């Protein structure tokens, strides 16, 4: 039998290392000690890691963030074609593929199909005719380093607050405001964000922030309902969809809800291992009475000073003293349960 080559011996050693629990003798010279230490370290890390349910952990925002990172070193055309042919290979329908591509910031299906056809047909020169080598333009922060410093400070302050209300959209709006103040122009009402929400999420990761579970927090009765759980688990707030009909209806309804002061969001941005203090108990109950309007101008019904003055002329009881705390010129009121009188819908 011919003697095994060095490559075959090395492969056998790797197989023994993979399928056995014993330590492989390194004296045969088939691999360096650094290689074995790296393999053993990777194996231990894989064993210690808990099983991740990617079906629950991965969202379309995560895919969009990775796609945004890849654009820094690879043309969006290549990435779009890679995503498109992968989706089609897995049997994803055209319309579903187009929806995914649009959400992550890639080319739409029609454009991706065009370049996929050029690549698969062998017309490689046409496929690589533009954007060779990926993005080479300077980054936004290279032009505005002072805005980056302000944005980091803003993020650190918001992440240090007890309330977990900070989102990547808040950072995007802050960057936009700082940008227009820096260049000295007025923002157009129809203008897009200066830095996209996906880019801001990646900025937070580059700066050392992590978006993770907000710890074991207290919940109170009623907040385990399926609709409430689904709403709380969604990291992105839903956007308003303006009706397209000529005579849309405005929905006005009354809502009375009781909140605990210890209620917190399920996830939030953290910097390092530090986290702000939070109330361990459920806290005091607070009942809110609102007349809510389904309109993009705002969810809460209110009157301007002129309208409120006319309302007082017709309904004099609106100006009478009350134990409830009303928001100015609105029908929204609140009281502390157990300390004030309950609302009676009168």
Image: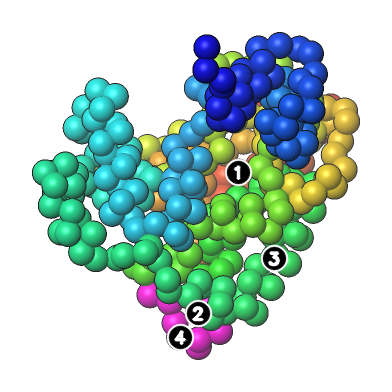
According to the picture, the residue beneath numbered tag 3 turns out to be 152
According to the picture, the residue beneath numbered tag 4 turns out to be 185
Q: Earlier in the sequence, mark 1 or mark 2?
A: 2
Q: Is 20 displayed left or right of 317 in the figure?
A: right
Q: Earlier in the sequence, mark 3 or mark 4?
A: 3
Q: Earlier in the sequence, mark 3 or mark 1?
A: 3
Tell me which residue sits at (20%, 33%) in the image.
95
Asked if one can make out residue 248 in the rendered structure from this viewpoint, the answer is: no
Which labelled disc corresponds to residue 332? 1
Question: Looking at the image, is mark 4 or mark 1 nearer the viewer?
Answer: 4
Tell me which residue sits at (53%, 61%) in the image.
172
User: Distance of mark 1 from mark 2, alpha carbons?
Assistant: 35 Å
Mark 2 and mark 4 in contact (Cβ < 8 Å)?
yes
Image coords of residue 14 (percent x, y):
63, 23
Which corner quadrant holds the C terminus? top right
| Label 1 crowd bin: few (<14), some (14–19), many (20+), radius 10 Å | many
Return the residue nearer the eye: 161 or 247.
Answer: 161
User: Distance of mark 2 from mark 3, alpha carbons?
Assistant: 18 Å
Question: Looking at the image, is mark 2 or mark 3 nearer the viewer?
Answer: 3
Question: Looking at the image, is mark 3 or mark 4 nearer the viewer?
Answer: 3
Give the quadrant of residue 343: top right
Q: Name the secondary structure under disc 2.
A: helix
Tell me which residue sits at (69%, 19%) in the image.
17
Instruction: Answer whether residue 38 is magenta in the image.
Output: no
According to the picture, the residue beneath numbered tag 2 turns out to be 180
Image coords of residue 274 (percent x, y):
85, 47
In the image, which residues are magenta?
Answer: 178-189
Q: Is 259 displayed left or right of 12 in the figure?
A: right
Instruction: Answer whether residue 183 is magenta in the image.
Output: yes
User: Distance of mark 3 from mark 1, alpha carbons?
Assistant: 36 Å
Q: Earlier in the sequence, mark 2 or mark 3?
A: 3
């Amino acid at each position: 039998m011919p003697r095994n080559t060095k490559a075959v011996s090395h492969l056998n050693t790797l197989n023994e290392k993979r399928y056995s629990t014993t330590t492989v003798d390194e004296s045969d010279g088939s691999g360096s000690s650094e290689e074995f230490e790296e393999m053993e370290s990777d194996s231990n890390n894989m064993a210690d890691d808990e099983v991740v349910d990617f079906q629950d952990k991965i969202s379309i925002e995560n895919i969009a963030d990775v796609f945004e990172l890849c654009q820094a070193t690879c043309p969006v055309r290549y990435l779009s074609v890679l995503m498109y042919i992968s989706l089609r290979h897995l049997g994803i329908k055209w319309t579903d593929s187009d929806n995914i591509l649009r959400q992550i910031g890639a080319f739409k299906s029609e454009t991706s199909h065009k370049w996929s056809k050029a690549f698969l047909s062998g017309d490689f020169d046409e496929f690589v005719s533009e954007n060779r080598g990926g993005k080479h333009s300077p980054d936004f922060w290279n032009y505005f380093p002072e805005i980056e410093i302000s944005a980091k400070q803003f993020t650190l302050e918001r992440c240090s607050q007890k309330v977990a209300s900070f989102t990547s959209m808040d950072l995007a709006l802050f960057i936009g405001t700082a940008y227009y103040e820096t260049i000295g122009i007025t923002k157009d009402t129809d203008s897009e964000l200066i830095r996209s929400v996906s880019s801001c999420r990646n900025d937070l990761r580059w700066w050392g922030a992590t978006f993770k579970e907000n710890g074991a927090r207290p919940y109170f009765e009623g907040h385990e309902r399926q609709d409430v759980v689904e709403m709380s688990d969604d990291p992105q707030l839903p956007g308003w969809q303006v009706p397209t009909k000529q005579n849309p209806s405005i929905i006005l309804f009354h809502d009375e809800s009781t909140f605990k002061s210890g209620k917190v969001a399920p996830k939030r941005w953290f910097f390092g291992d530090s986290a702000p203090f939070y109330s361990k108990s459920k806290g005091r109950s607070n009942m809110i009475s609102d007349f809510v309007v389904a309109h993009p101008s705002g969810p809460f019904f209110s009157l301007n000073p002129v309208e409120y003055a006319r309302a007082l002329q017709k309904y004099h009881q609106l100006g009478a003293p009350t134990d409830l705390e009303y928001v100015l010129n609105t029908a929204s009121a609140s009281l502390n349960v157990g300390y004030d009188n309950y609302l009676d819908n009168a």
